[in-house]
Image: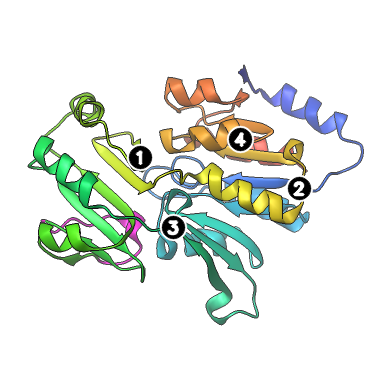
Amino acid sequence: MTTMTESSAAGIEDQRETPQKLMIALDVDGTLVDHDGHMSAPVREAAQAVVAAGHEVMIATGRSLNATLPVIEQIGIDRGYAVCCNGGVTLRLHPELTDGYEIIHKATFDPGPALRALRKRLPSAKYALEVEDGNFLSTERFQDASFGVEAIGTDFQTMLEATAVRVVVFSAENTPEEFNEAIQHIGLAGVTYSVGWTAWLDIAAAGVTKASALEKLRSSLGVDASCTVAIGDGRNDIEMLTWAGRGVAMGQAPEEVAAAADEVTKSVYDDGAAHVLRSLL
């Protein structure tokens, strides 16, 4: 891992005499937008410039579909692909499609075993579950902007019987350290999961990550593995940063995320993504 500076970014630009078409995967929260959901002008303009340059730019986020679409629009992607729900949903974007997109892949799973195990260890936690039609079910009035829709309140038994695309668990009564310890103690099997900044857990189908979805797209698009770039900041980005030919962690990323990357740029509050994106032009 190296730390990227303005001068090293300029050096990368100088080395590229002939522009290559790249596949560029961009995380959203903590990368394109700060933790208040704000995208700065420099980041927006740099992302729009990379899109306009003709690269295969795609959002790769833990957010659900409806919370991802505004970001896609903001950076000017009207055709191509996007990965939502940490790899659980893949979109194809094109202006001729109804609503401008179609779902081309959706990975579902039985959330029952994981939910039962979590409930025993974290009885006071809040649970939300995305079902196949994109709606959310939740316990205890649990809502979050990443859902993109208002969750429908339900009982825990109904959630156990649902088919899930994404499960989210949040505990206001545990520290992130306590929460992480509880998850490790449970030893979740048959699913893929990542722990967030706070006492927050995202669960997807077994083997499903941002990287798994991106690799399917890379293969179908015929992009060489060396021509892939990814930028992210969270633990759910680790596989993606390892997958990319050039994986860049944001400056505020946890230590294990930075260790998985080839470079570390500036933080989201210092427009770190903009520095990386400009180096690709």
Pointer 1 or 2: first along the chain: 1
The kind of residue on which mark 3 rests is Ala
Q: Is 108 situated above or below 262?
A: below
Q: What residue range appears in magenta?
A: 140-150
Residue under label 1: 193
- The spot of residue 101 in percent (x, y) is 56, 72
Residue under label 4: 243
The CA distance from mark 2 to mark 3 is 23 Å
Which residue lies at the image location 29% right of the left edge and 62% below the top edge? 163
Tell me the element at label 4: helix
The CA distance from mark 4 to mark 3 is 20 Å
Relative depth, front residue between 34 and 263 = 263
Tell me the element at label 2: loop
Pointer 2 or 3: first along the chain: 3
Say if residue 171 shows up in the picture: no
The kind of residue on which mark 2 rests is Val
The kind of residue on which mark 4 rests is Trp
- The spot of residue 279 in percent (x, y) is 73, 36
Q: Quadrant of residue 130?
A: bottom left
The CA distance from mark 1 to mark 3 is 14 Å
Say if residue 280 shows up in the picture: yes
